[in-house]
Amino acid sequence: MDKEYPIPLYYRVYQNLKQKILDGVYKPGDRIPPESELVQIYNVSRLTVRRALEELRSEGFINRAKGKGTFITGRKEEEQMNVLKGFTDKAKDEGFSVKSIVLENKLVEVPPELAETF
């Protein structure tokens, strides 16, 4: 990055990464390069990269998972209140792998006063 422009370096890194997300270079669920690689790619300090990533995170474009990396979540969109999503669906949307384990499965008799409700 040319350091002579009046625009802050972190903002130029942020805009470049954001544009790559919007252009589909990085797709939802993709892991972006670690901070150390971004430092080399953009020829900036680690603090500059962290600030750019924080901007992307605050806008909802990325999600950072400690020890796992930084993942693309896509564009930040208003949450639709008419669509309910559970934990599993939300976790999958953010790029996490999810599994469920059934601990017990049995038939239970419903009390007569509740039978019509069910």
Image: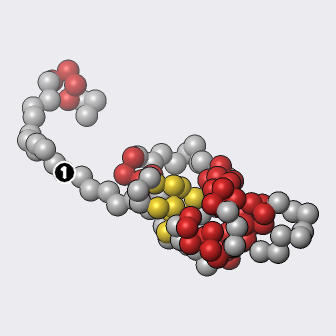
The quadrant in which residue 105 appears is top left
Number of callouts: 1
**Is residue 52 toward the left or the right of residue 2 in the image?**
left
**Is residue 72 toward the left or the right of residue 50 in the image?**
left
Which residue corresponds to the image point at 14% horizontal and 29% vertical from the top-left?
Answer: 110
Please, what is the three-letter code of the amino acid marked with disc 1?
A: Ile
* Colouring method of the image: secondary structure
In which quadrant of the rendered image does the N terminus lie? bottom right
| Residue holding disc 1 | 101
The quadrant in which residue 5 appears is bottom right
The quadrant in which residue 111 appears is top left
Q: Relative to 111, does residue 58 appear above or below in the rendering? A: below
In the foreground, 79 or 117: 79
Which residue corresponds to the image point at 24% horizontal and 30% vertical from the top-left?
Answer: 116
Residue 89, horizontal then vertical, whole percent = 41, 54
**Residue 50 visible to the viewer:** yes
**Residue 77 visible to the viewer:** no
Residue lying furthest top? 113
Which residue corresponds to the image point at 48% horizontal and 57% vertical from the top-left?
Answer: 94
Secondary element at image label 1: loop
**Is residue 116 toward the left or the right of residue 93 in the image?**
left
Residue 11, horizontal then vertical, whole percent = 78, 61
**Is residue 21 toward the left or the right of residue 4 in the image?**
left
Q: Relative to 55, does residue 109 appear above or below in the rendering? A: above
In the foreground, 45 or 58: 45
In which quadrant of the rendered image does the C terminus lie? top left
Which residue corresponds to the image point at 59% horizontal and 48% vertical from the top-left?
Answer: 80
Residue 114, horizontal then vertical, whole percent = 22, 25
